[in-house]
Image (cartoon, rainbow, N blue to C red):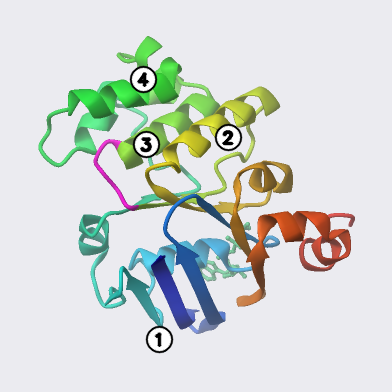
Amino acid sequence: MTLLTLNAMQTNIEQYAVLHDVTLTVPEGGVFVLLGRNGAGKTTTLRSIMGLWRPSPGSVTFRGEDISALHTAEVARKGIAYVPENMGVFGGLTIEENLILATKTGKFDTARLNRIYDLFPALKTFWGKQAWSLSGGQKQMLAVARAIIEPRDLILIDEPTKGLAPSIIDAMADAFREISETTTILLVEQNFHFAKSLGRDMAVIDDGRIAHTGSMADFAADKALQDQLLSLSA
Ligand SMILES: Nc1ncnc2c1ncn2[C@@H]1O[C@H](COP(=O)(O)OP(=O)(O)OP(=O)(O)O)[C@@H](O)[C@H]1O
């Protein structure tokens, strides 16, 4: 079943046309990976879904409803969470305070909190520590935990592996695999190794246009296409 559709989305930032014609269908369940070179338009695509930029013309449809005109808070209330590239955690607040602020009621649901502890044990260990003192990987875990502290249907995650050590990236992949059993993930990545271990469906964006869509298995097997669209061998 289709969860999210981007229909011929064009996004301008100031006088620049950044997305020209982004059309994409994200099915419900699993991890959908959006790949692309630096500056291709990946972050702009996520921000356009969240209502942080306005596509015009074009639209965003979530569970069949046009959400393009909604404010970001309303998009979030529809069940979409966003983990931006800079993670958006509050450095001066503890892990507990960062998570409390991400709840609707200011109270934790015990089952959800226990699930977060299982996914990211370091968050339990460092519960009372201020976020600025955490490692890059732990901050990323906190950012993802904030996104799932309430029930969500879709999480948009922007380059979560950037600057992280390989062992942390493996732990992140395991967590994403588990999260995606109940919540669809739209993952923007440049780390192809990480992305291919997770994605079922994928797309490549290039210069503000979708240059390829298909299954990750097919794309992973096509070295020539990877070289052409991602310049992996460059
Ligand atoms: N606030 C802005 N003002 C002007 N141009 C912008 C702005 N944000 C992004 N752009 C431009 O839009 C294009 C797409 O940027 P975007 O951040 O979406 O790319 P990206 O694929 O996420 O790249 P990266 O992997 O480097 O984050 C780039 O050419 C970028 O310079």
Q: What residue sits right under mark 2 in the picture?
A: 173
For the record, the magenta segment spans: 149-153
Task: Look at the numbered disc 1 and say if its residue's Cβ is closer than 8 Å to ligand 1.
Answer: no
Mark 4 and mark 2: Cα distance apart in space: 16 Å
Locate residue 109: give its quadrant. top left
> Which residue is at 44% across, 52% downward?
29
Q: What residue sits right under mark 3 in the picture?
A: 89
Query: N-terminal of the two: label 2 or label 3?
Result: 3
What is the number of the mark on residue 56? Answer: 1
Dot 3 and dot 4 residues touching (CB under 8 Å): no
Q: Helix, strand or loop at disc 3?
A: loop
Query: N-terminal of the two: label 4 or label 1?
Result: 1
Dot 4 and dot 2 residues touching (CB under 8 Å): no
Nearest the eye: 88 or 103: 103
What is the number of the mark on residue 87? Answer: none
Mark 1 and mark 2: Cα distance apart in space: 35 Å
Q: Amino acid at mark 2?
A: Ala
Q: Is residue 150 magenta?
A: yes
Q: Is residue 123 left or right of residue 74?
A: right
Nearest the eye: 116 or 64: 64
